[in-house]
Image (spheres, grey):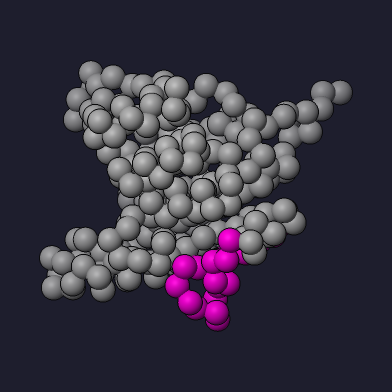
């Protein structure tokens, strides 16, 4: 009898930081900001990776609920709007925690903003201890500071916890020279350097996130999270998405 993949596969990475945008939780077709079926799908994919023995930290976005910058159009100043966006990321973190726990995955939600009733404060050594104990650490509230994106928060947390890779989950299958929706002839990169990503101003992540990963030599893998088992293939080191490295 063939053994299951989870028992035979050897992951390329021991500890990962998965960046999930707020849009990953959203079903635009129905208008749901938090779609239960999508949450279950995300939880199942994370559980499969966790069952390989991989240590998993997750940084959540909040754009499905609120974005700080567009809030200025509603008369909300940027700093207040960014803090509202941070609260939205915590909502997503709690929703993901609840779903993961229902699937038998032990978790901890940690927040850059102090809200002890619902989340632990983000403390680097505590986060690493949770990972070592086999818990999935879900990190909300970005960096805790306005004007910084959750991509920057992902790069920061990946650096702090000594992640082997930053997995940037998107709805496209990698980094392109241009928006592939607007230009079907756009070139897809299989591999690219941090310097080229910065020089060409590729907008899959902001410059601060690219720079932080470059300084700390953390590879970034940009892939389509919504392809079946794509995160598993990414963790196993298969050729998926676009890899951003220094060489």
Magenta span of residues: 99-124
Question: Which residue is most to the bottom?
Answer: 117
> Which quadrant of the structure image shows residue 234?
top right
Front one among 167 and 7: 167
The correct choice, above or below, for 1 with respect to 34 in the image is above
Question: Which residue is most to the right?
Answer: 1
**Image quarter in which the C terminus is found:** top left
Say left or right for 139 vs 143: right
Say left or right for 237 vs 192: right
Q: Residue at x 58, y 47 (%)?
A: 162
Q: Residue at x 42, y 55 (%)?
A: 153
The correct choice, above or below, for 87 with respect to 167 in the image is below
Say left or right for 190 vs 3: left
Q: Position of residue 148 (x, y in %)?
A: 32, 58
Q: Residue at x 51, y 48 (%)?
A: 159
Front one among 103 and 110: 110
Observer able to see residue 210: yes
Q: Position of residue 229 (x, y in %)?
A: 57, 34
**Image quarter in which the N terminus is found:** top right
> Which quadrant of the structure image shows residue 3?
top right
Front one among 67 and 38: 67
Q: Position of residue 175 (x, y in %)?
A: 35, 29
Q: Residue at x 72, y 53 (%)?
A: 132
Q: Is residue 171 magenta?
A: no
Q: Position of residue 210 (x, y in %)?
A: 37, 40
Q: Is residue 113 magenta?
A: yes
The correct choice, above or below, for 215 with respect to 139 in the image is above
> Which quadrant of the structure image shows residue 67?
bottom left
Observer able to see residue 89: no
Question: Which residue is most to the front?
Answer: 215
């Amino acid at each position: 009898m063939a053994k299951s993949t989870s028992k035979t596969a050897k992951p390329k990475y021991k500890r990962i930081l998965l960046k999930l945008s707020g849009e990953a939780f959203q079903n635009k077709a129905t208008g749901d900001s938090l779609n239960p079926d999508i949450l279950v799908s995300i939880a199942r994919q994370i559980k499969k990776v966790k069952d390989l023995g991989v240590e998993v930290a997750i940084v959540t976005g909040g754009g499905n609920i609120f974005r700080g910058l567009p809030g200025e159009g509603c008369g909300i100043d940027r700093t207040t709007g960014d803090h509202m966006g941070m609260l939205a990321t915590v909502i997503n973190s709690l929703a993901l925690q609840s779903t993961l726990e229902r699937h038998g995955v032990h978790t901890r939600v940690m927040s850059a903003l102090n809200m002890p009733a619902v989340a632990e404060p983000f403390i680097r050594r505590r986060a690493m201890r949770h990972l070592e104990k086999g818990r999935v650490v879900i990190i909300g509230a970005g960096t805790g500071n306005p004007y910084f994106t959750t991509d920057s928060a992902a790069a920061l947390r990946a650096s702090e916890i000594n992640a082997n890779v930053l997995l940037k989950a998107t709805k496209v299958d990698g980094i392109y020279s241009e928006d592939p929706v607007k230009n079907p002839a756009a070139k897809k990169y299989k591999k690219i350097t941090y310097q080229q990503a910065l020089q060409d101003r590729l907008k899959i992540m902001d410059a601060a996130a690219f720079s932080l990963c470059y300084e700390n030599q953390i590879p970034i893998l940009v892939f389509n999270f919504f392809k079946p088992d794509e995160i598993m293939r990414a963790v196993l080191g298969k050729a998926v998405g676009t890899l951003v490295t220094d060489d």
